[in-house]
Amino acid sequence: MAVTSAINYRLPQVEQLLQHPSLEKYIKSVSRPVVTNIIRNQLAVIRQSDAFKQKGVEGVNVIKDITQLCEQYRQQRLTRVINATGIAVHTNLGRSPLSTDLWDSVRRVNTGYSNLELELSTGKRGGRNGLLPALVTNWIGAEDCVVVNNNAASVYLVLQALASGKEVIVSRGEQVQIGGGFRIPDILLMSGCKLVEVGTTNITTSDDYINAITENTALVLMVHQSNFSIQGFTESPDIEDVARRLPEHVRLVVDQGSGLSSEQYADSETPLSRYLQLGADLVCFSGDKILGGPQAGIIAGKQSLTQILAKNPMMRAFRPGRIVLSLLEEMLVRKLNREASGEGVAQHTLNRCGTTADRAVDLMTQWQPWAKAVPLQMQVGGGSIPSETYDCYGLALSLPGKAQRHLDALRSMPTPIIGYLHGDKLMLNLATLLEEDLPLFKAQMGNYLQSLVKEKGQSEADAKAGGCDADTK
Ligand SMILES: *Cc1c(COP(=O)(O)O)cnc(C)c1O
């Protein structure tokens, strides 16, 4: 038969495909050249495929393949998501979201020119820190501060500038790894310092520190354990005692990590100001953990030391841009004025816990029979306060089929919802839902559950038509 000669091998042209209505949104979101490349590559793949060789265009679905690839690219874009994990400062979800108020208030200074390095009173070149040192002084009682891009950079800069070629004493219980690959011993090595380990994993005393000091010692570095806790037979040194007994040439630096100040999360936590009172020469911490500001590292304490840091050549590589500095400045002003927008997301989440029970019951009623209101725990996260949890409520959803499938589906929504699994249940913690996200959360979930009702109805109808009992489980 001459059927083979009728096979159509004419694939659409690239230009023609770019006009296809279903690609319009991808041109907007990932750009025309990227979509063009996807189309070219996919056409090449299709030409080589057996299905195409055997059946021509009838054997392939060009536009479906291309939109699927475009969708993968689109999902790579930074996008807003809804946090239903119960972890307020979530490393995978951008750590601390900023309040809309705060963001809006720095718009003008960032979309125009600014006095970033101009002293308005004299017309001369000025420093980049603006009001920040004054704010930090009033906030935690530090003489001065230096701001860098993140707290890992703080630690590196402090070590490099104050202790390169010298010995740094660190407790064995504080040689921690924070996140992916930031290990205190490695950073010490890279900054040119010699690590002197003291104490044991669970016990380090002030004597351990003091006895390890030589004429070559530059620093005692204390590191907040951040993402784990050791319980049981433990002893940490009396910081005040260590500080008092340190000789003139040795400084005490505390990597506090979270930026906890007046927040009342855990009695066991020492706030920044307290470390300085106890005699730490410098404290360093992140801007986007408990403080809840932009990503930054802040090093605060003795001016004689911050001046050395500020003059270090690495400072040029570590200094943040005006967006970060303006946000930090505005945030601290609001914080000192005790405005709600000056509080970090962790505090807001904690405040919200009490309202989650009513909300959970309300949603349970709306989303019968899938959802059940359940007591859950909220965590600060971001490697801060690892051992504390706070009571709140959320939803446990029992949905048809594998829970994993629904977890994935929620992540593919226009504004992805990030939940987690507990056994065969899909869990949504309501404490970490931002107020602004609530309407969208309800709408998207409502639609999704509605689609499951339809799906269920359809499969029951199919089952009946096929003469089988409907699976009503
Ligand atoms: C989080 C943390 C760091 C790293 O801070 P980044 O801002 O993530 O760079 C360093 N030290 C401690 C104790 C921390 O908790």
Image: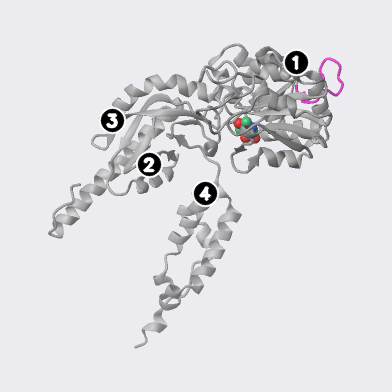
Rounded to the nearest whole Å, what is the CA distance between mark 4 and mark 2? Answer: 25 Å
Rounded to the nearest whole Å, what is the CA distance between mark 4 and mark 3? Answer: 33 Å
Viewer-closest of 158 and 439? 158
Please state which amino acid type lies under the numbered disc 4.
Arg
Q: Is residue 431 above or below residue 33?
A: above
Magenta stretch in the rendered image: 114-129
Identify the residue under disc 2: 421
Q: Could you say where residue 296 lies in the image, as x and y percent from the top left?
A: 66, 30
Q: Is residue 255 left or right of residue 290?
A: right
Q: Is residue 293 left or right of residue 370?
A: right
Rounded to the nearest whole Å, what is the CA distance between mark 1 and mark 4? Answer: 47 Å
Magenta segment includes 450: no
Q: Ligand 1: does it lie within 8 Å of the C-beta at label 1?
A: no
Viewer-closest of 353 and 460? 353
Q: Secondary structure at mark 3?
A: helix
Viewer-closest of 450 and 188? 188
Q: Secondary structure at mark 4?
A: helix
Identify the residue under disc 4: 74
Q: Which mark is residue 364?
A: 3
Q: Secondary structure at mark 2?
A: strand
Q: Residue at x 38, y 20 (%)?
A: 355
Q: Is residue 188 left or right of residue 437?
A: right
Q: Which mark is residue 186?
A: none
Rounded to the nearest whole Å, what is the CA distance between mark 2 and mark 1? Answer: 47 Å
Identify the residue under disc 1: 143
Lower sequence index among marks 3 and 2: 3
Lower sequence index among marks 4 and 2: 4
Rounded to the nearest whole Å, what is the CA distance between mark 3 and mark 2? Answer: 18 Å
